[in-house]
Image: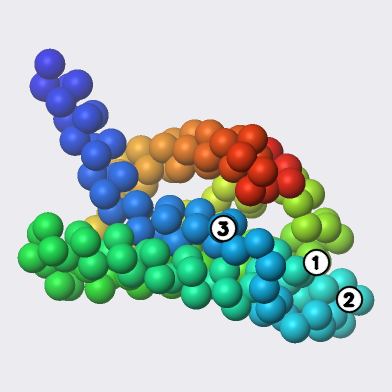
């Protein structure tokens, strides 16, 4: 019974700490068109820097909703420091996602092409760095969150595909 309760608490803690970053990563998909962050420019390898899928509007929508979730945490917990760290993890999540797109373009992958693990973990690893540095996540919580993130990423991307929000189910 105690082990089950500990696992439930670990899962809830992981979801609580990573929810702002997950929301930040998930909400830009609602922006259908926008101004590409790379402004259509190509890198020295001849490929787009980031591609059309990374827009200023999507970046702002993600950061806005990440802020809302982080701020809600503050209202519930009365913990300004942790709220600030959670919002920094949102910024890191966006930067991690942009880095993932940059890497995909360098590999010659086009928008929507599958990059196993990179597609699922770019935002998670970047946000984890912030959370670990500030002592909010230890290695056990990191592993629990990793499993949750991978499973949720697969599920939410399939749902977004079915709803027509994404062109591919990954």
Badge 2 element? loop
Residue 130 visible to an observer of this rendering: no
Q: Nearer the viewer, residue 82 or 64?
A: 64
Q: Nearer the viewer, residue 61 or 43?
A: 61
Q: Which mark is residue 106?
A: 1
Q: Position of residue 111 (x, y in %)?
A: 78, 57
Residue at (70% x, 76% y) in the render: 36
Please state if 127 lies on the left or on the right of 169 as rendered: left
Q: Are marks 2 and 1 in contact (CB under 8 Å)?
A: yes
Q: Nearer the viewer, residue 33 or 49?
A: 33
* Residue neighbourhood size for the residue with mark 1, other residues' Cα within 10 Å, grouped as few (<14), some (14–19), many (≥20): some
Residue at (82% x, 73% y) in the render: 48
Residue 118 visible to an observer of this rendering: yes
Q: Give the residue pinned by disc 3.
A: 30
Query: Which quarter of the rendering shows the C terminus?
Result: top right
Q: Are marks 3 and 2 in contact (CB under 8 Å)?
A: no
Badge 1 element? helix
Give the mark, 3 or 1, whose residue is nearer the N terminus: 3
Please state if 66 lies on the left or on the right of 8 as rendered: right
Residue at (30% x, 45% y) in the render: 14
* Residue neighbourhood size for the residue with mark 3, other residues' Cα within 10 Å, grouped as few (<14), some (14–19), many (≥20): some
Q: Which mark is residue 5?
A: none
Q: Give the residue pinned by disc 2.
A: 45
Examine the rendered structure and indicate whether residue 28 appears above or below residue 95: above
| Residue located farthest toward the top when viewing the structure as drawn | 1
Q: Position of residue 159 (x, y in %)?
A: 57, 36
């Amino acid at each position: 019974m105690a082990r089950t309760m500990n696992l439930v608490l670990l899962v809830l803690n992981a979801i609580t700490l990573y929810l702002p970053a997950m929301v930040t990563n998930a909400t830009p998909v609602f922006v259908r068109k926008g101004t590409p962050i790379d402004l259509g420019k190509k890198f020295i390898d001849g490929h787009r820097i980031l591609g059309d899928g990374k827009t200023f509007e999507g970046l702002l929508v993600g950061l806005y909703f990440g802020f809302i979730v982080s701020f809600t945490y503050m209202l519930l917990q009365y913990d300004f420091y942790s709220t600030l760290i959670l919002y920094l993890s949102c910024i890191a999540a966006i930067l991690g996602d942009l880095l993932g797109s940059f890497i995909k373009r360098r590999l010659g992958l086009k928008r929507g092409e599958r990059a196993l693990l990179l597609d699922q973990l770019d935002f998670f690893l970047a946000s984890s760095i912030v959370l670990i540095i500030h002592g909010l996540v230890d290695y056990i919580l990191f592993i629990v969150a990793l499993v949750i993130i991978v499973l949720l990423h697969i599920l939410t991307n399939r749902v977004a595909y079915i709803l027509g929000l994404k062109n591919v189910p990954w």
